[in-house]
């Protein structure tokens, strides 16, 4: 018998991304717990707004099986953003009713969800004590009708950044989605992360309000991003700055935006 799955996710300045994110896994999970700061204040203690009526209408259209619950609490009580990040995830986890708890952020879409949930998760039933990790797929910047995507030197899709996402009821989030459980397993799940691929004002909002915002002030990432064009993108090699993980990104490739999802989905087949 399949183990039931709870998902926690976050609602703030990324609200416009949330419906597509939830739609990518809705059919495969049993419960979705959404966190929303009751004062509409970010982890970095800045105000945010979004079209709440429009979002609730979209979520209602998705939620045909009544899986979604929104929890409104104070998620900005600490002075350091990452402490608020950890607190929110742990509080949301306490509302989950199932043994397996997954965490997907609003700006993430599962690219190979069907294969993951139907082909890999039955194997995972023997590994309930392990935390699972997925591979991020990272578009970098959209310019006109083209999208620049982080890639390897041979132009293949870069799948080197990983993130913990699935844990159990007894673990504790202690750094974003990483928990105190050191028993981990890399899964073949690939997740499209729109993190840095957004309009300039929206990216500035994210960099100054996400869990790593304390690192942003002294990091040249944003200024480098602003300077990238379709004429100079191929000069950007072996890049990434202090606050965004360990592995360097080798290069960018240019993909027509209307072909992006198909190209990415085909590329992630290598994850298996």
Image (spheres, helix red, strand yellow):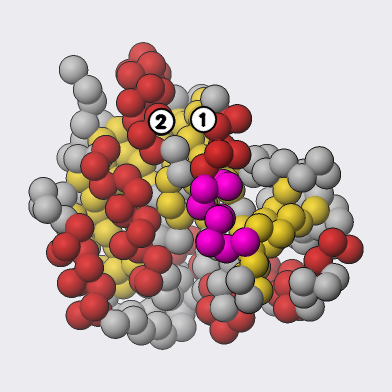
Q: Residue at x 24, y 53 (%)?
A: 33
As rendered, which of 211 and 220 lies closer to the eye?
A: 220
Task: State left or right for residue 177 relative to residue 271.
Answer: left
- Residue nearest the observer in this picture, 70 or 64: 64
Marker disc for residue 173: none
| Residue that label 1 marks | 188
Drawn side of residue 118 relative to residue 155, left or right: left
Q: Residues within 10 Å of mark 1 (few under 14, many from 20)?
A: many
The part of the chain drawn in magenta is 256-264
**31, above or below 72, in the image:** above
Residue 116's label in the rendered image is 2
Q: How far apart are marks 2 and 1 (CA)?
A: 7 Å
Q: Is residue 167 a member of the stretch shown in magenta? A: no
Under circle 2, the secondary element is: helix
Overall secondary structure of the magenta section: helix
The image shows residue 69, relative to residue 81, as above or below, that is above
Task: Locate residue 204, reporting x and y percent.
Answer: 60, 79
Q: Quadrant of residue 98?
A: top left
Residue 48 visible: yes
Determine whether, in the image, residue 182 is placed left or right of residue 66. Answer: right
What is the secondary structure assignment of the residue under circle 1?
A: strand
| Residue drawn where x is 55% and y is 56% of the image | 259
Identify the residue shown where x is 66% and y is 74%: 143
């Amino acid at each position: 018998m399949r183990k039931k799955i709870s998902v926690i996710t976050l609602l703030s300045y990324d609200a416009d991304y949330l419906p597509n994110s939830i739609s990518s896994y809705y059919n495969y999970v049993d419960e979705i717990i959404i966190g929303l700061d009751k004062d509409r204040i970010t982890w970095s203690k800045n105000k945010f707004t979004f079209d709440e009526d429009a979002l609730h209408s979209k979520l209602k259209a998705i939620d045909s099986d009544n899986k979604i619950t929104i929890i409104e609490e104070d998620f900005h009580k600490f002075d350091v953003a990452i402490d608020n990040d950890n607190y929110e995830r742990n509080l949301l986890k306490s509302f989950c009713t199932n043994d397996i708890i997954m965490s997907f952020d609003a700006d993430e879409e599962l690219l190979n969800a069907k294969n993951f949930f139907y082909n890999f998760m039955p194997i995972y039933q023997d590994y309930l004590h392990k935390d699972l990790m997925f591979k991020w797929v990272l578009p970098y910047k959209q310019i006109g009708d083209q999208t620049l995507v982080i890639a390897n030197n041979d132009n293949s899709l870069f799948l080197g950044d990983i993130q913990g996402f699935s844990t159990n009821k007894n673990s504790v989030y202690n750094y974003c989605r990483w928990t105190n459980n050191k028993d981990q397993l890399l899964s073949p799940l690939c997740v499209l992360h729109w993190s840095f691929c957004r309009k300039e004002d929206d990216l500035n909002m994210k960099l100054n309000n996400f869990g790593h915002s304390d690192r942003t002030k002294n990091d040249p990432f944003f200024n480098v991003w602003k300077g990238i064009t379709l004429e100079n993108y191929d000069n950007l090699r072996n890049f990434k700055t202090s606050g965004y993980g360990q592995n360097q990104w080798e290069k960018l490739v240019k993909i027509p935006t209307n072909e992006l999802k198909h190209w990415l989905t085909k590329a992630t087949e290598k994850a298996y």
